[in-house]
Image (cartoon, rainbow, N blue to C red):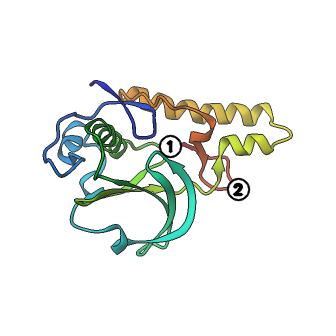
Amino acid sequence: AAATESAEGGEVRGAAASQTSDSNVVAVEEVIAARGSIPISSRYTTTRTLESEYIIEKKVVGSGMSGPVQLATGIDDNQKYAVKSFKKKGLSSRKRQELKSEVEIYLSLDHPHIARLEMVFESEEEIDLVMEYMAGGELYDRLSKCKQYTEALAADTAYQMLLAVAYLHAHQVAHRDLKLENFLYEKKETNHLKLI
C-alpha cells in the first residue's frame, strides 16, 4: 500500500485508499476486509453521537493538528478517554485522505504498547476519535524530571518502544513521527508505555 502522511504529521502505510461515500471519510468495510482480526465495526458509527456516550470535560490533555485533545468520561463505564475532533468542512482532499488513512489504520491496530482507538463517531460535519487516555504523561517529561535512570529501566523502556515499532512494521505501517513525546505512560505509578 502507498504511504501517506498522517494528520499528526507522520507517514502511515496500509489501509485501502478508495472511499465508499462522498460524505464519509472512513471506509470501515475496507478496514474489516483488509484486517478483520479485531472488532472494528462496533468501534465506528455514523448513527450515534459522541455526546450520547461521553461527557466531554474542559480539561485539555494534549494538542494535535486538529486542535486540542480533550479529556472525556464514558457515560456507561465512567472511564477516562482522550478525544480528538476534526471538522470535515474545509479539509483539502489531501488532508481528508490523510485523516482517512490514519483512522482506518488506527482501527486495525491492537497491541499492548500502542494506545487504542476506542471509538470513531463520524457525522456530516466532523469526526471524533475517542482514544485510550494515557494518564501517566509523556516519556519525555518523565525523563526530564529524573535525576537518575537505571540501566534496567532504560532497557525496559527501549524494549517497550521497540515492541510497538516492530508491531507497526510487521503490519506494514510506518509511524514516521517517533519521538519521546509520542510515547506515553498508561498511569503515573507504572512504567507501562504506549505509542500514540
Q: Report x, y in % for residue 56.
A: 46, 70
**Quadrant of image for the N terminus:** top left
Q: In the image, 23: left or right of 100?
A: left
Lower sequence index among marks 2 and 1: 2
Residue position marked by numbered label 1 in the rendering: 196
Q: Is residue 116 above or below residue 154?
A: below
Residue at 48% across, 55% down: 132
Amino acid type, label 1: Ile
Q: Which label sits on residue 70? A: none
Front in this rendered view, residue 72 or 86: 86
Q: Report x, y in % for residue 88.
A: 29, 52
Q: Residue furthest right?
A: 147
Q: Report x, y in % for residue 123.
A: 25, 60
Residue at 49% across, 43% down: 114
Residue at 22% across, 36% down: 34
**Helix, strand or loop at disc 2?**
loop
Q: Residue furthest front?
A: 90
Residue position marked by numbered label 2 in the rendering: 189
Q: Is residue 26 above or below residue 118?
A: above
Q: Report x, y in % for residue 25.
A: 24, 47
Q: In the image, 167: left or right of 60?
A: left
Q: Is residue 107 above or below residue 83?
A: above
**Helix, strand or loop at disc 1?**
loop
Q: Residues within 10 Å of mark 1 (few under 14, many from 20)?
A: many
Residue at 29% across, 40% down: 92
Q: CA distance from mark 2 to mark 1?
A: 19 Å
For marks 2 and 1, give the one nearer the viewer: 1
Front in this rendered view, residue 139 or 90: 90
Amino acid type, label 2: Glu
Tell me, yes or no, whether the two marked residues, 2 and 1, touch with CB atoms within 8 Å: no
